[in-house]
Image (tube, rainbow, N blue to C red):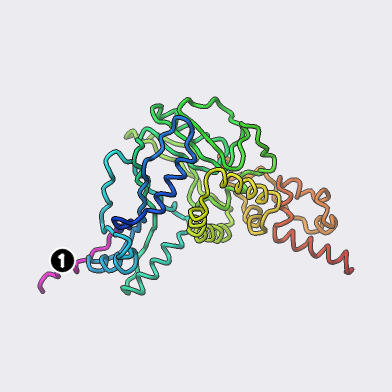
Amino acid sequence: QPAPHAAHQSAHRVHRIEVRPADGQRDMRGESVQRQCAAAAVAGDAVPSRVEHRAVYLIEGALHAEQLATLASQLFADPVTQTATIDGAVAMAPGAVTVEVHPLPGVMDPAAESVQEAIHALLGVRVQVRTGERFDFAGVTADQALVVDLGWRGTIQDNFAHILTDVHFHGVYMGLFPYLNRQPVNVSKEALAFDGNLGDSFDHVSPPAVLESPLTPNIPSAVSYRLHPDGRVLVVTQEEVGRAGDLISNFQEGVRSATPFLVDHFIANGYDFELLSAASKVFLKRYFVDPDPGVADIWFNSTHDDTFGALNRSPFGKGFDPAAILRAKGDLLKIPHALESGWPSGYMRWLPVHSIATQSALRSLYGS
């Protein structure tokens, strides 16, 4: 048999497609990130003169060149306003720094699932897809780094700074507790919702892992390190047992599905750091003081609480005594497990507790 034409040769591999605005089109996502960098900058920080954004699709499967071209033109890129690059990253501009963001393993990727189904409908083949975003920052150098995390003291950022003393690390956090160590000279930090180092109140943020638990990917935690005989440093991990896996997956899928709409909302309404900070303060207060039942279910149905260094042992009580809840008739001070939980407002929203408390209230109103 004659060899197939090169365009139809296919092998099972990972293909990369990048999509960017066509020449002459505005890069709305890049412009938004550039404005956010300018708003978040502190004295001494370099602000990128330009940010270029590209959507990234990693497609694992046996696809030949014509199929990839079809996907690029009919699925991923608008032929009028966008340009697609197949099986190769676009070279970044001289002097630019590239940052690429992908979901962690174990984290839901709804966009990828939609793309997989679209490819099957278009080509009749099954593939695996991971989505991502690429940002090219012009006007900054690699001796500056941005760290983004939930919180709570920026200790990991400090560790980076101690190791790479010639790099300046700027951290952006949901909240910051008072520091326990002297801050390295090559570190700066700011927080959206509260900064305990500036006198902001944070008593309501307890237990802090209540916010971490729904957002943590289902991958092993690094608990220590060991030296391999060949000189490599290997990570010692521990499986996170006792997670409310299905609830967390549903929560993360909802967050990722909503994210593009939130980004569009932020861009359309010109959100800056000040506006996001005001919204974050309101969100965080409600999250802990008046929590959604689903968040409470994740916390109390998990025996592992995702506290850094907890080693799967939670210091917070998660007991359940139906008789005590019935006797209390809604009085938190009469429910020992509610107080032991460290999060009584969340305890009362936990589905089994809320159900029994409601039953108790109905009995009080209408009798047994």
Residue placed at 45% from the left, 40% from the top?
A: 38
Q: Is residue 10 magenta?
A: yes
Tell me if mark 1 has few (under 14), some (14-19) or many (20+) residues whose alpha carbon lies within 10 angstroms of its own. few
In the current view of this chain or complex, which residue is farthest to the front?
24
Q: Residue furthest left?
A: 2
Seen from the viewer's position, the closer of residues 270 and 238 is 270
In the rendered image, residue 237, in percent from the top left (x then y), is placed at 47, 44
Q: From the viewer's perspective, is 105 left or right of 359?
A: left
Report the span colored magenta. Answer: 1-15
At x 84%, y 55%, the residue is 328
How many callouts does the rendering have? Answer: 1
Look at the numbered disc 1 and give the secondary structure of its residue: helix
Q: Does the magenta-highlighted stretch encompass residue 140?
A: no
What residue is drawn where x is 54% and y is 61%? 254
Q: Where, by quadrant of the figure, is residue 235 drawn?
A: top left
Residue 165 appears at what percent x and percent y? 41, 27
The quarter of the picture where the C terminus appears is: bottom right
In this view, the residue in front, 305 or 21, is: 21
Q: Is residue 28 left or right of residue 68?
A: right
| Relative to 126, residue 167 above or below | above
Q: Amino acid at mark 1?
A: Ala
Q: Is residue 365 above or below residue 177?
A: below
Residue 306 placement (x, y as % from top left): 57, 46
Which residue is denoted by mark 1 in the rendering? 6
Residue nearer the viewer, 97 or 368: 97
Q: Would residue 141 be found to the left or right of residue 271 on screen?
A: left
The residue lying furthest to the right in this view is 367
Quarter of the figure with the N terminus: bottom left
